[in-house]
Amino acid sequence: MAITRKPAKAASAVASEAADAADAFISGAPDADADAPPAPRRVRKGRKVQITLTITEPLLQRVDELAEQLGQSRAAVINLAVVQMLERGLRLGGGE
């Protein structure tokens, strides 16, 4: 039995396989889907999601005063206000 060389592949087939391997490698990268918007990062606390809210100091004082009057937490008062706004609508300009 004679020893023979492995037949050489055509140059175009080798280039095609290399391109396919490169595409597979690149598409497997963590940032490969850069066009898609990043998923929002969420911190879960039970059934709730933690958010960051920025408000003015005077508004925060009013919220804290109301929370104390109602015997509720600041977060509970803010949640209540959001629920009421969503259920009853939002009036802008203070008009009745």
Image: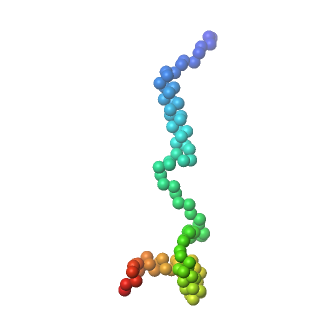
- Identified at 56% across, 69% down, the residue is 52
Q: Position of residue 28 (x, y in %)?
A: 55, 43
Residue 35, position as x, y percentages in the image: 47, 49
Who is closer to the viewer here, 51 or 14?
51
Quadrant holding the C terminus: bottom left
- Whether residue 41 is visible, yes or no, is yes
Relative height, residue 11 to residue 85 (above, below): above
Q: Is residue 96 left or right of residue 22?
A: left
| Farthest-out residue, left | 96
* 63 relative position to 94: left or right: right
In percent of width and height, residue 67 lies at 57, 84
Residue 13: where, in percent of width, then height?
A: 48, 25
Q: Taking 49 as reference, is 31 above or below it?
A: above
User: Outermost residue, top direction?
Assistant: 2
Please report the residue visible at 50 percent of the width from the left and 34 percent of the height from the top. Answer: 20
Task: Check the image and report above or below for 40 versus 50.
Answer: above
Quadrant the N terminus occupies: top right
Q: Nearer the viewer, residue 14 or 4?
A: 14
Q: Residue at x 39, y 79 (%)?
A: 92
Q: Residue at x 50, y 32 (%)?
A: 19
* Residue 63, quarter of picture: bottom right
Q: How many marks?
A: 0
Of residues 15 and 52, the one drawn nearer to the viewer in this rendering = 52
Q: Is residue 76 visible?
A: no
